[in-house]
Image (cartoon, rainbow, N blue to C red):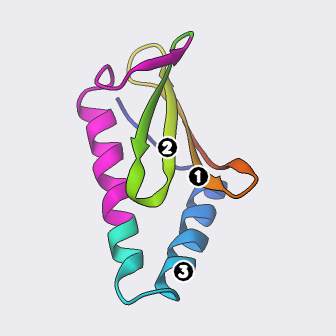
Amino acid sequence: MILRFTPEADAELTEARQWYSHHRKDLDLEFMQCIEEALSRIQSNPRLFPVVYGGLRRAIVRRFHLHFSYSQGRGDSAHCCLSFATQSGYMEVAYMS
């Protein structure tokens, strides 16, 4: 499975990383490490995470209150969305395909 960040997704992750960098030393690095670990697990075993609706699967990163919702397309393609928890609910911030 190949995941590619859209320019919008890349910009959103950059903004999130900057936000975490202002809150605690190295928190931005910990954030990106969690993102990379989750994406690596999705790529290495797309069926690892549970199906939550139809063919949509969810990989949760509890430390940062975010999750990846994704579905595998044909071949190596996938559609993936990164969402994080806010006080008013979940906000979708990044799309990958």
Q: On residue 84, which mark appears?
A: 1
* Crowd band around label 1 with a 10 angstrom C-alpha radius: few (<14), some (14–19), many (20+): some
Q: On residue 67, which mark appears?
A: 2
Q: Position of residue 76 (x, y in %)?
A: 38, 23
* Crowd band around label 3 with a 10 angstrom C-alpha radius: few (<14), some (14–19), many (20+): some
Precedes in sequence: disc 1 or disc 3: 3
Q: Circle 3 — which element?
A: helix
Q: Nearer the viewer, mark 1 or mark 3?
A: 1
Precedes in sequence: disc 2 or disc 1: 2
Q: On residue 37, which mark appears?
A: none
Please give left or right for residue 32 compared with residue 55 in the image: left
Residue range of the region highlighted in magenta in the rendering: 32-53
| Residue contact at pointers 2 and 1, CB within 8 angstroms | yes
The amino acid type found where label 1 is placed reads Phe
Q: Circle 1 — which element?
A: strand
Q: CA distance from mark 1 to mark 3?
A: 16 Å
